[in-house]
Amino acid sequence: MDAILAVEDLRVSFAAHAAMFTRDRRRIVAVDGVSFALGPGETLALVGESGSGKSTVARAILGLVPYSGTIRIDGRDVAKLPRGERRALTRRLQMVFQDPYSSLDPSMRVEDIVAEPLDIHEHLGGGARRDRVRELLDAVGLSRDFAARFPAQLSGGQRQRVAIARAVILRPSVLVCDEAVSALDVSTQAQVIRVLAELTREMHMSNIFITHDLALAAKIADRVAVMYFGKMVEVGTSATVFPAPAHPYTQCLLSAVPIPHPRVQRGRQPIPMIGELPNALQRPEGCLFHPRCPKAMEVCRREAPAITTAADGRLVACHLVTARDAS
Ligand code: SF4
């Protein structure tokens, strides 16, 4: 597979005060050695609890936060390109944000919001600009008279359709959706997902779909990457990971997802995780998940598990999987 996007050993950290009213500043590690590749037309779901680092991965890819490591688009290291070339390359990556209420400028009309990337990158004239906006409004299921409205005149679902139209107007190669439907009610969510799926297919885009909703990820993703505390702990195809998760963290998350079948759901027991995500300033020794892991062993408290390839091809960072595949 020739990757459109390849991320190697990505690391992001932020300075933070260790406590209120102190000068003691420390580094919070938000993303810790993340690597993955995205193929043409592929949808990769990045999943994990809030605070797992998945949105920070997206922000680093889009150049919105400083990072170390390598991000390649079409094989070219973005950080090593001259500024003009970097700008041309990064327009191929666009993002849809979570909150449709704060991501649109309330003082702009829909036509100008959707056309904003065109105005920056292509400087199209009046008629051609208007035609492109109309074409995109049609594609996201909004009639043309929406072009003259302001965001305050739109529902949450309509705002998110406008945000999607703006994100795809330059025909990006990669669309990053950061919890793009989590603020919407279930029926609007289904409609917006359908619009995204159709646009993805028609424009041959690849998708990074960031969500804490594993049921949704299972429906739309070709592959899934599970993140915990800034690290990837399990990466594999949806067909292998969702029916039989290998990492205890993935097992816990999936056991809490309700199954829409009353008889099957009655027979299921959630696997409880112990406590909450630890304080970001106090990273545990050994496996980062060991204080919460229902299967933790002595070795887990001392040694961080390396990410290894399991027999079915998925990547897992867990001593249990390493021991099983070695035997
Ligand atoms: Fe649990 Fe140990 Fe595996 Fe970490 S390495 S997930 S603590 S069993």
Image: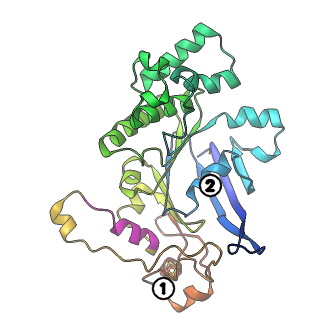
For numbered disc 1, what is the local secondary structure?
loop
* Residue furthest out toward the bottom: 298
Among numbered discs 1 and 2, the one appearing first in the sequence: 2
- Residue beneath the point at 43% across and 27% down: 153
How many numbered dots are placed on residues in this image? Answer: 2
Classified by dominant secondary structure, the portion drawn in magenta counts as helix
Residue 201 can be seen, yes or no? no
- Residue beneath the point at 71% across and 63% down: 13
- Quarter-wise, where is residue 300 in the image? bottom right
Q: How is the image coloured?
A: rainbow
* Residue furthest out toward the top: 127
- Residue beneath the point at 81% across and 32% down: 84
Report the disc number at residue 229.
Answer: none
Label 2 sits on residue:
57
Q: State yes or no: residue 311 in magenta.
A: no
The image position of residue 37, as x and y in percent, is 60, 51
Range shown magenta: 249-259
CB within 8 Å, label 1 to label 2: no
Residue 244 can be seen, yes or no? yes
Would residue 289 appear left or right of 295 to someone viewing this image?
right
For numbered disc 2, what is the local secondary structure?
helix
Label 1 sits on residue:
296
The image position of residue 154, as x and y in percent, is 42, 30
- Disc 1 residue: CB within 8 Å of ligand 1: yes
Would residue 284 appear left or right of 215 to someone viewing this image?
right
Would residue 171 appear left or right of 91 to someone viewing this image?
left
Q: Nearer the viewer, residue 221 or 54?
A: 54
The image position of residue 114, as x and y in percent, is 55, 25
* Residue furthest out toward the right: 82
Query: Which amino acid type is shown beneath numbered disc 1?
Result: Ala
